[in-house]
Image: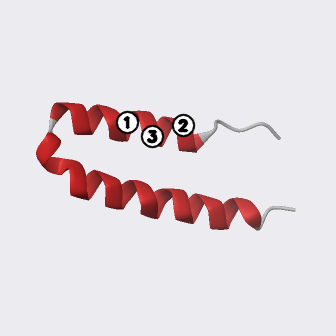
Amino acid sequence: MNGIPLQPIIAILAGILILLRPSLLNYVVAIYLILVGVLGLVGSRRF
């Protein structure tokens, strides 16, 4: 089953947000790390 790779999309959106609003850097990085961690856990449970 081929799905859309979410990590690259999240990374691009995070990069755009940081470019537009550098003051959001801490929040964007924190949200990115949480999402990547959750996606990693969910992805590792697929058989």
Give the class, few, some or many, for how many residues have Cα within 10 Å of label 3's Cα (few <14, many ≥20).
some
Q: Which mark is residue 11?
A: 3
Q: Residue 45: x and y, percent? A: 76, 68
Between the C-alphas of marks 1 and 2, the distance is 9 Å
The residue depicted at 12 percent of the width and 47 percent of the height is 23
Instruction: Name the N-terminal-most of marks 1 and 2.
Output: 2
| Residue type marked 3 | Ala
| Residue type marked 2 | Pro
Give the class, few, some or many, for how many residues have Cα within 10 Å of label 1's Cα (few <14, many ≥20).
some
Contact flag, marks 1 and 3 (Cβ < 8 Å): yes
Q: Residue 36: x and y, percent? A: 52, 57
| Image quarter in which the C terminus is found | bottom right
Residue placed furthest toward the right: 47
| Image quarter in which the N terminus is found | top right
Q: Which mark is residue 8?
A: 2
Contact flag, marks 2 and 3 (Cβ < 8 Å): yes
The residue depicted at 54 percent of the width and 37 percent of the height is 8
**Disc 3 secondary structure class:** helix
| Residue type marked 1 | Leu
| Drawn side of residue 7 relative to residue 42, left or right | left
Q: Which mark is residue 13?
A: 1
Residue 46 higher or lower than 15, as above or below: below
The residue depicted at 50 percent of the width and 36 percent of the height is 9
Instruction: Indicate the quadrant where residue 17 lies.
Output: top left
The residue depicted at 15 percent of the width and 38 percent of the height is 21
Between the C-alphas of marks 2 and 3, the distance is 5 Å
**Disc 1 secondary structure class:** helix
Between the C-alphas of marks 1 and 3, the distance is 5 Å
